[in-house]
């Protein structure tokens, strides 16, 4: 087996898994853009926090004043996506849909990352099945929200 053939065969499984993950998440991305994003629970407060951060440059979780009651990771992520989405549309729904889209694309990256990490200890077929199981985790079938 030539080194080039071995390399292409090595990455073939990754490429197949990448295509499957993109198609799988593309289905959810397209179906999510057809309906409004409904916020409930913590998603409502994260959205509020990101909106206040963009509008007033103030980090708040429950109110309109400073209140750092949660770690800022997810609200900062949302604020960044909302700020980027505002370049294209002033609709808040577009920003929320864009945040969902970015989350789905990050999920595609994690599927490939899990597969590549599993390759350190497992054969290709077992790593591929593990990547598929990670991709088809039952939570993926629920309606996506901003949380």
Image (tube, helix red, strand yellow):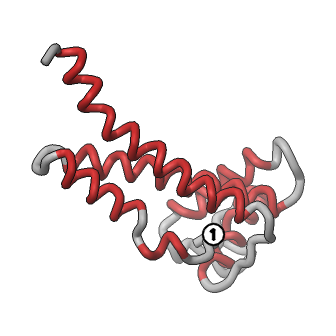
Name above or below for residue 101 compared with residue 35: above
Query: What is the residue that sits farthest to the left in this orientation?
Result: 121
User: Does 64 appear above or below 31?
Assistant: below
Location of residue 49 in the rendering, given as x and y in whole percent from the top left corner: 67, 69
At x 27%, y 58%, the residue is: 129
Q: How busy is the neighbourhood of tag 1: few (under 14 within 10 Å), some, or many (20 plus)?
A: some
Quadrant where the image shows the C terminus: bottom right
Q: Is residue 57 left or right of residue 118?
A: right
Q: Nearer the viewer, residue 20 or 100?
A: 20
x and y, in percent, of residue 143 in the image = 62, 75
Q: Residue placed at 26% from the left, 29% from the top?
A: 9
Looking at the image, which residue is at 55% across and 50% down? 23
Q: Nearer the viewer, residue 139 or 78?
A: 139
State the residue in front, 33 or 16: 16
Q: Secondary structure at mark 1?
A: loop
Dividing the picture into quadrants, the one containing residue 34 is bottom right
Q: Residue furthest right?
A: 90
| Image quadrant where one finds the N terminus | top left
Is 86 positioned to the left or the right of 128 in the image?
right
Q: Position of residue 124 (x, y in %)?
A: 20, 45
Percent position (x, y) of residue 6?
A: 19, 23
**Number of numbered discs overlaid on the protein picture:** 1
Residue lying at the far front of the rendered structure:
1
Q: Residue shown at 38%/52% (left/top)?
A: 111
Viewer-proximal residue among 22 and 98: 22
The residue that mark 1 highlights is: 146
């Amino acid at each position: 087996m030539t080194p080039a053939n071995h390399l292409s065969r090595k990455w073939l499984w990754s490429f197949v898994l990448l295509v499957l993950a993109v198609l799988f998440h593309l289905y959810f991305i397209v179906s999510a853009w057809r309906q409004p994003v409904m916020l409930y629970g913590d998603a409502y407060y994260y959205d509020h926090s990101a909106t206040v951060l963009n509008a007033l440059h103030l980090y708040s979780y429950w109110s309109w004043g400073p209140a750092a009651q949660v770690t800022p990771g997810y609200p900062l992520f949302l604020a960044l996506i909302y700020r980027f989405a505002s370049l294209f549309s002033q609709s808040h729904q577009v920003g929320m849909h864009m945040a969902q889209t970015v989350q789905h694309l990050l999920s595609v990256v994690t599927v490939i990352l899990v597969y590549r990490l599993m390759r350190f200890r497992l054969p290709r077929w077992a790593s591929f099945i593990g990547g598929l199981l990670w991709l088809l985790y039952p939570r993926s079938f629920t309606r996506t929200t901003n949380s």
